[in-house]
Amino acid sequence: MHLSALLSLPASLAFLTFTLASASPHSYTEHLHLLPLPQSHLHAHFNFTATTPLSAYESSHFRYFPRSLAQILQHTRTKELHLRFTTGRWDDEAWGARPLDGTREGGTGVELWAWVDGEGSTTVAKERWSELVNSLSGLFCASLNFIDSTKTVRPVRTFEPEGHHGNAKGGLQLLHGMLPHEVVCTENLTPFLKLLPCKGKAGISTLLDGHKLFDATWQSMAIDVRPVCEGKAGEECVLEIQQSVSMALSIPRSMRERHDPIPRPARIEDVECDESKPWNGHDTCFPKALTGEPAWTLSKVFGHAAKGACDLERDDQAFDVTLEVPSDRPVNATGASELTFPSTTRRHYRLSASSSFDLSLPAHSTPLGQNSPPSPPLYATRQIAGHGQERGSMHTTLRNPHAHPLTLVYMETLPWYQRPYMHTLRLANGKQEKMYYTPALDRKRGTHLELVLTIPAESTATLTYDFEKAVLRYTEYPPDANRGFDVAPAVIRILANNESPQFAGSYVRTTSLLLSLPTPDFSMPYNVIILTSTVIALGFGSLFNLLTRSFVLAEEVPPSPLAGVVRRMRDLVKGLLGKNGDVAKDEESSEVKDGKTAEISRYMREETKGKANGIANGDADLRDRRARGSP
């Protein structure tokens, strides 16, 4: 701070400003990790970390910590928060273990869990949880307000606090909720970027384009708030927020030209055929499996290059981008300086504040089986079986690919209209240690199930149980009732044991499921409503018409004043138009009519006189007609 500006401040404020500037307790860092994946995919993990002292947080003094989120946490007395927005599916079979052991990802849709200070009361904790989800719903433009009591559970063993809460840990209550049907889109990304100090205008956050992010095969946005204490004497604890975005991009799809976004098949001349296949021929081509990595450029994958650095109190040895590729692969980097660290697979770059950063990698051929991804701690699949609209069964397969047993916590959150039969719960090829079960209450609470299981080494365990489908009220069905109802994914946490300590704290989530419930024919109520409305309209309309209308003769109806005005106007117009020529024409036509009338009268007199003479002279024809009655 300049000395002149410092001297212009009051003494107390100047002392506070000088103390904060010299100690610099607030910090902010950002980092991008790039890792090529098999099948021409690229994993990109963005991490933004900001800290603020707890004393500054309690006094509402913020520098890099987002004030809008901090005020929500203070009002709801939330001590630790974890929020996830996830779409797509991570391919464990092809890409291996999940990024950061699955700790920064959630289930499909939106997932939220937090430790709330309920002051020893469950009712107070519920009220503050409701305020939290409603506030976050408005902040992130999401439907978090739909996490009500039917979608809220209290896990026992699945989650552990990541922060340091000290003596206050005993009074905190954990609440968890999921919305598997929530669609993650640009409306959620924009508030996410506004929480950053550089607002997505500088640094690696400029690469977060909604068209590229939500076109990825798998992506997850995470927000984690926790208190951190280093444990050093005299050092104050800080409140840390980590905003992270993790995605798996298809390189050919992301590098497709924007002016022609429609995917088109490659020409037959550009396809390398696998001639070892027995069906290969001159008119048949089976594409050969890709064994290498295609060439890619950072600006083409994300749409543009990174626009400089978000230079906020960076350390001299801090790096912004890490690229994990073999050391023999050439890399061309512009707009950054490469930092040297003792690593054979990682390259670190520090962005320049005045120039754009870009990476370019040529194509690289990798022999089959080389650089295979690490194996995940567990493979998990889950599906609904059965037929009919009354009952069904849940099947979960857990496969342990390692040479040592695994101990895990398996948690399911079922909606209240899916009623499990716990006496049908079966675990094949595994051991059940403990079970935590909370039954559902219709329209009040969902089913909460937690199991502590042990899976033997290199074996597959199967968990099954039957359930009943409830019949909903017709007002409880969504507009797309025949699509089905989403069931939240299962959450699996690997526990620590002596034989597999490296997997302790890892998380695996299954995919969400679609449950088909008995659905009425909504066209029948529509038909009933239309028919009833028609009958009521006809009957009531006729009766009302008879009761309110008065019937009179036409002669009793008084002439309308408007009709008289119209008649006078018509006569006036005729009079104006007929002054010049119409009068003479009327007189001439009158004379013609008078002549014709005189001639007709004379003819009639003569005809009558002739008939009289004929009768007097005894005209035979006339007498015969008279006799026959003819005229």
Image: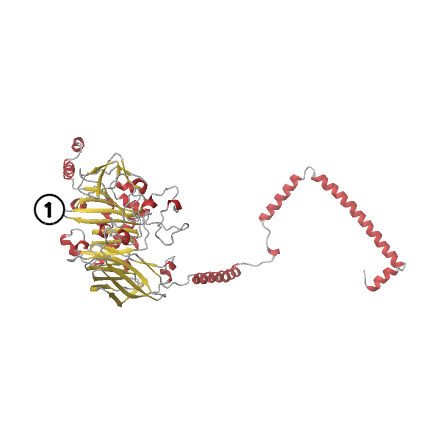
**At which x and y percent is residue 211?**
34, 45
Q: Residue furthest top?
A: 4
Q: Looking at this view, is 297 or 485 the one in front?
A: 297
Q: Residue furthest left?
A: 233
280 lies above or below 571: below
Residue tagged by mark 1? 232
- Asked whether, in this view, residue 133 is left or right of residue 612, the answer is left
Residue count near mark 1 (Cα–Cα under 10 Å), binned few <14, some 14–19, many ≥20: few
**At which x and y percent is residue 456?**
20, 62
Q: Is residue 64 visible?
A: no
**At which x and y percent is residue 314?**
19, 39
Which quadrant holds the N terminus? top left
The image quarter in which residue 22 lies: top left
Q: Looking at this view, is 88 or 422 the one in front?
A: 88
Which quadrant holds the C terminus? bottom right
Q: Looking at this view, is 52 or 4 the one in front?
A: 52
Q: Secondary structure at mark 1?
A: loop
Q: Count the numbered circles shown.
A: 1
- Asked whether, in this view, residue 393 is left or right of residue 575, the answer is left
